[in-house]
Structures are given as structure tokens and as C-alpha cells.
Image (cartoon, helix red, strand yellow):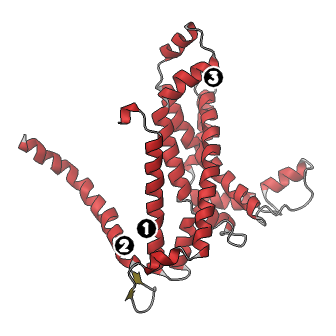
Amino acid sequence: MKRRGGLGWVFVAPALALTGVFFLWPLVLVGWISAHNWPLIGRVRWVGWRNYLAAFDDELFLSALRFTLAYTAIITPVLFVIAFGLALLANVDRRGAALFRTVWFLPTSIGISTASVLWVWMLNGDVGVFTAILNRLGLVSGPVPYLDSVPGAFVAASSMVVWKTVGFTMVLLLVGLRAIPAELHEAARIDGAGGWQAFRYVTMPLMRRSVKLALLLSVTGSLLVFDPFYVITRGGPQNGTMSLVYWVYNSAFVSFRVGYAAALALLVLALVLAVNLAQMVLLRDGDDA
């Protein structure tokens, strides 16, 4: 028995080493930096908890927090509903179903920064595809300033995120749908259940774990959003689309307040852990107890 335990540690050791080198040690280092006034160039001074306290007096940080929470609350249900609808449409064994799934999944293979740059070109008020389509349909005449208002910039960046990630969420949900035995739906129909009743009492309960995973990944990605608002909107107009991670980046590499940025990063980590823990508790089922 001891030999088996020792052999297990041998197999686990590489993963533990990688976790220690690339996560635990950097986390400790970030914690140490966050307790200092750490300019990129200059004298480092110990400040204790002052960086953390300063965050709650920082209006831009609080604005970024409000924006990120609002973005997460809006984009998560929109993304989930669209992805679930696509998964239901893709969950058929008909001609063209494989092509349908492939077309919707293809944007996932594009890097998020690359997709953001592509969206910048498509949103260009003078030569962009979207403006050309709207002009052709007669809905507008001339350039369209998509990014000149906070709602417009929000919709523009969010639409890219949905286009880029909906295929991945669709596949996660499709895997859950495919795992449901067909006999259960047949038994429900024999018992007189309609389409909605079968979906509510058969499909959704058996999809619980897939739904949980999709929501966890979606919420985590939304709280940590950076590239779309950095590349497409630059946090504007007037810092109206400044996300939390974008403000951490600004504090570290624009303002050169590395210690303050480290404190903000740990606050963001705490927020993500708290939200994910709350989700796991709310979505817990009997098998998780």
C-alpha cells in the first residue's frame, strides 16, 4: 500500500511542480509586490494594506468594477440562450447538421485579439462591412459612429464576444444533450409528455452539469474580459467601457504603479473566486453533496 502511495506521488509530482512554479510562486510574489509602493523605476517602499484601501477610493476602479459586473450580468444570459438554441438545432442527425456545427464553431479557432482587430475593421464607419450593409439596405446614409457612445461601444464589443465564443458554449451544451439517452424522451412521450414538459422535466435536469460548466466558464471569462475593450473601444468613450483587467493593465504599464496593480489583481482574483463559489453553491445538485 505504501508503494502505491509513493508511486502516486511520483506521477503527481510534475503537475505539482508546474503548479508551484507557474501559479503558487507568482501568486506569492504578487502578494509581496502588492504590499509595496513599487514604481517601475525608483525606490520600493513598504506600504502594507494601503494599496488595497486605495482601491476603494479609486473612482476608476469602482467604475470598472460596476461596468464588468454589468457586462457579466448581460453577456452571460445572452450567450447562454443563443448557445443553447444552437445546441438544440445542432442536436439532430440530419444532412447538413455537421456543417451547421462546424460553421458556428469556427470563430472559436480565431484568437480573441485577432477577432477584435477584425471587428475594428468591420466597425469602421467609412469602409467597414457593417456600414456598407446598412447603407445598402437603406437604413443609414453615410458613416455610422458605432464607438462614439458607451451603449454603442458596449454592443459592438459584446457582439464580437458572442460571435467568437458562442460556438464553444454550444459544443459544451451539445455534449450534454448527446449524453441523454433517447429512451428517456421516448418514455416521456409514451407517458403523454409534450415537448415543453419533456424539455423541462427530462432534458434540463440531465443537462445540469453541462449547464453548470458552461456558466462557470462564461462568467469567469466575462469577469476577466480584456482584449475586446482594449482593442475595439480602448476603454472609451470617457472610460465608459473600462473593464477590471484593463484597469489593472493601465495601472501597471501606463501609470507604472506596479504595487497598486498587484493589489488590484488580487482583488479581481478574490472576486472571481467568490462569484464562482457562489455559482457552485447555487447550481449544486444532489450528486455534488
Q: Are marks 2 and 3 in contact (CB under 8 Å)?
A: no
Among the two numbered marks 2 and 3 on one chain, the one whose residue lies closer to the N terminus: 2
| Residue hosting label 2 | 31
Could you classify mark 1 by the number of other residues whose Cα lies within 10 Å: few (under 14), some (14-19), or many (20 or more)? some
Q: Amino acid at mark 2?
A: Gly
Q: Are marks 1 and 3 in contact (CB under 8 Å)?
A: no
- Secondary structure under the numbered disc 1 in the rendered image: helix
Q: Is residue 134 above or below residue 191?
A: below
Q: Amino acid at mark 3?
A: Arg
Query: Disc 2 and disc 3: Cα gap in Å?
Result: 55 Å
| Residue hosting label 3 | 95
Name, please, the residue furthest toward the bottom. 43
Among the two numbered marks 2 and 1 on one chain, the one whose residue lies closer to the N terminus: 2
Which of discs 1 and 3 lies nearer the camera? The answer is 1
Could you classify mark 2 by the number of other residues whose Cα lies within 10 Å: few (under 14), some (14-19), or many (20 or more)? some
- Secondary structure under the numbered disc 2 in the rendered image: helix
Please name whichever residue, 244 or 98, is drawn nearer the observer in this view of the structure: 244
Relative image position of residue 196 (x, y in whole percent): 63, 21
Which of the 4 image quadrants contains residue 158?
Answer: bottom right
Residue 266 badge: 1
Query: Disc 1 and disc 3: Cα gap in Å?
Result: 50 Å
Relative image position of residue 167 (x, y in whole percent): 58, 41
Could you classify mark 3 by the number of other residues whose Cα lies within 10 Å: few (under 14), some (14-19), or many (20 or more)? few
- Secondary structure under the numbered disc 3 in the rendered image: loop
Q: What's the residue at 63%, 64% (across, down)?
A: 229
Q: Is residue 245 above or below residue 47?
A: above
Please name whichever residue, 112 or 224, is drawn nearer the observer in this view of the structure: 224
Q: Are marks 2 and 1 in contact (CB under 8 Å)?
A: yes
Please name whichever residue, 147 or 78, is drawn nearer the observer in this view of the structure: 78
